[in-house]
Image (spheres, rainbow, N blue to C red):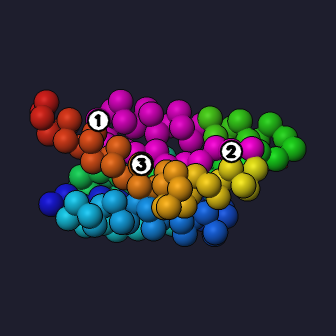
Amino acid sequence: MAKLLLVEARFYDEFADALLEGAQQALEAQGHTHDTITVPGALEIPAAIALADQSGKYDAYVALGTVIRGETYHFEIVAGESARAIMALTLDGLAIGNGILTVENEEQARVRARRDEKDKGGEAAKAALALMSLRDLYS
Ligand SMILES: Nc1c(NC[C@H](O)[C@H](O)[C@H](O)CO)[nH]c(=O)[nH]c1=O
Ligand SMILES: CC(=O)[C@@H](O)COP(=O)(O)O
């Protein structure tokens, strides 16, 4: 049994709830436990993971959030930099599943967040478990 940390950005509560449910269900179905922490937005997720990893408490991490394009370049920063930083942490040996939606509108987010549709939260949780297993296999 592994212990994971779900790091959620609750910028949009509706989608945050759906992503969290999907991730929680995926972990519980495989007998794993988890804690959940909340940050203001997707840009804060990588730092929260890095800080939490210093505790040594968690085997893997799941990043959950929704980034919806607005009128400015900020979408590229939030979407791109959160993904880049998560990838950097992953290449540094942390097992992280990236469930941060980067979408054009709320309808695209709704479909991808829901468990009974694309379930990106569950997908990210399973990705974290897969990386954790690979790390255990090769370490
Ligand atoms: N526009 C979205 C944001 N923006 C906020 C940033 O993530 C960050 O919290 C702020 O820049 C302070 O550092 N965050 C999301 O998660 N989703 C968005 O659509
Ligand atoms: C992804 C964002 O930061 C975006 O939602 C912000 O909207 P805007 O670009 O219109 O300020």
Towards the viewer: 77 or 62:
62
Look at 20% across and 35% down and name the residue there: 134
Look at 37% across and 52% down and name the residue there: 125
Q: Which residue lies furthest to the right in this view?
A: 71
Towards the viewer: 134 or 78:
134
Q: Distance between the residues labelled 3 and 1?
A: 17 Å
Q: Does the residue labelled 1 lie within 8 Å of ligand 1?
A: no
Which one is closest to the eye, mark 3 or mark 1?
Answer: 3
Residue 44 in sight? no
* Circles 3 and 2 in contact, beta carbons < 8 Å: no
Rendering quarter of residue 139: top left
Point out residue 82 in the picture as x, y percentages from the top left corner: 56, 41
Point out residue 98 in the picture as x, y percentages from the top left corner: 46, 45
What secondary structure is found at the residue carrying circle 3?
A: helix
For marks 3 and 1, the one nearer the N-term is 1
Residue under pointer 1: 93
| Residue 20 appears left or right of 92 | right
| Residue 79 appears left or right of 130 | right
Residue type highlighted by circle 3 = Ala
Rendering quarter of residue 2: bottom left
Residue type highlighted by circle 2 = Val
Q: Does the residue labelled 2 lie within 8 Å of ligand 1?
A: no
Look at 62% across and 35% down and name the residue there: 80
Residue under pointer 2: 103
Residue 78 in sight? yes
Residue under pointer 3: 124
Towards the viewer: 124 or 88:
124
Q: Distance between the residues labelled 3 and 2?
A: 16 Å
Q: In this view, does 137 lie above or below 31?
A: above
Residue type highlighted by circle 1 = Gly
**Where are the magenta residues, as a range?**
81-104
